[in-house]
Image (spheres, helix red, strand yellow):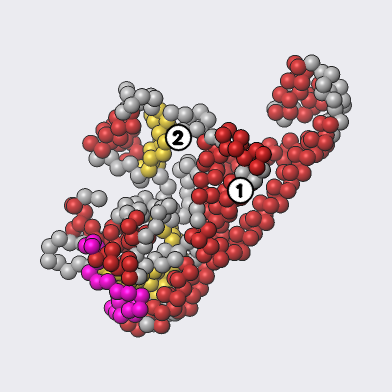
Amino acid sequence: MTAENRGVQQDLPRRIVVVGAGLLGGSLLSALQLHRPLDDRPGTTLVAVSGAGTLEALRNRDWCDELHGYEALEDACDEADLVVLCAPLSALQSHLLRVSAARDRLARGAVVTDVGSTKALVCRTGFDGFPDEGEGSPRFIGGHPMAGSEKSGVAASDPLLYQSALWVLCPPPELPEGQDGGLRAMISVLGARLAVLDPVVHDESVARISHVPQILSSLLASWSGGEERLAEIALSLAAGGFRDMTRLSLSRWEVWRDIVATNPAPVAQGLSEISQRLGELAEAAQAWSEALKEFDLAPFDTDRRGRFFDAVSRGAMGDAGTLLHTQGLPRSLVQSEEKYRELFQEGASFRSRFRMPRKGIVHDLHEFVVRLEDRPGQLLALLEPLAQAGVNVVDVEILKVREGESGTVLLGFASAEEATRARDVLGNDRFLVMDR
């Protein structure tokens, strides 16, 4: 972020209080201070509430106008227009209750929000603690910026952490129009993308794409190394696919304990459903194994065995049966093949929608891929002309192991117009530009 951005106000709230200045809270403060005016105009007062060690670290930075310990939380919230609770989920509830008990000390029309990874339980407490008490009464709006890092603490703060991240808001029913304006302005200043969801829908959704996958990743890594006789050999054979599927297993349980504890029902349902489907797949594979035992493939020559498995791979089960000199294969083998075929088709169909332009709760990125030669300097040669032309690349992904796209870079842009400008800048003289 450049110095020219420091004068941009974008209607930020007059007094913002950040409770818990670790990675998320610290990154919020470090980003917001860049947008305060450099002249003598009234600006936003930034207030931090945190532990003694964090406050000491903040004193060496110019991010805040006021520093308060947790014991002075209520005092820090005097006339606050926006209070952002950034503490871990285990502490967030108690902070929320304390602020709600002192809500008469907040500014008129104030908003209290949070950055917790689960929303239903927090929003229930927040909505009860900040009821509609008439015009100008403070209200609670649940929030979840889907951004983070493997690091923690104020020392890991990053003013760019929220750029292009999705920030979910869960407002209460019948929130007065415009009361969330200051919160939305802050999200816009941070460069995040906004989405609005019901708290329960949020928790059920993130259980599917975050919470349950985290547990499955840990389970997969644990299972892969669970057989001592095979562990070292398996590890030596592991490549990109295993790396990607087990990356989440490096997460610490101390971080995830609060998430599982505050979203147990969707997690339990997800694991139960996956367990049932895994059981069905295991039964299908076992049935396939038993069916093949009925046929002795050994007498057949290599060519015929090859044609048999080729027929199976094509789903041509009738041809496979003919090669085995039988009128029809066992129904169990046919059903097993169908079960796996449907699984792979459904999985591929849903996963392919992850990157394609799609309608939904948030504006999606506009993307294309560029094929690069495998030689030094190609990435710089790709991005440098875009920077010189003032084209903002919102997302960059190096596609290393995807079939058919090896040696390509995925570029994402905020608008179709920006993507078109990028394509014009790059042309096809030095790079092969292709649709995603």
Q: Is residue 2 left or right of residue 266?
A: left
Q: Residue at x 73, y 28 (%)?
A: 312
Split into 4 quadrants, where in the image is the C terminus?
A: top left
Q: Does any portion of residue 137 appear in the rendered image?
A: no
Amino acid at the residue labelled 2: Leu
Q: Residue at x 58, y 33 (%)?
A: 237
Q: Is residue 319 left or right of residue 181?
A: right
How far apart are the alpha carbons under marks 2 and 1?
Answer: 27 Å
Q: Residue at x 52, y 68 (%)?
A: 120
Q: Identify the residue under disc 1.
A: 222
Q: Is residue 299 left or right of residue 12?
A: right
What kind of element bears circle 2? strand
Q: Does any portion of residue 35 appear in the rendered image?
A: yes
Establish if 80 lies above or below 188.
below
Q: Single out the mark in the foreground, 2 or 1.
A: 1
Quadrant of residue 408 within the rendered picture: top left
Establish if 156 lies above or below 418.
below
Look at the image and give the residue range highlighted in magenta. 60-79
Q: Residue at x 47, y 49 (%)?
A: 359
* Residue 372, image x, y percentages: 38, 27
* Magenta residue check for 244: no
Circle 1 residues within 10 Å: few <14, some 14–19, many ≥20: few
* Residue 149, image x, y percentages: 41, 53
Quadrant of residue 371 within the rendered picture: top left
| Pointer 2 or 1: first along the chain | 1
Q: Identify the residue under disc 2.
A: 399
Establish if 375 lies above or below 240.
above
Quadrant of residue 38 within the rendered picture: bottom left
Q: Is residue 286 left or right of residue 241?
A: right
* Residue 222, image x, y percentages: 61, 48
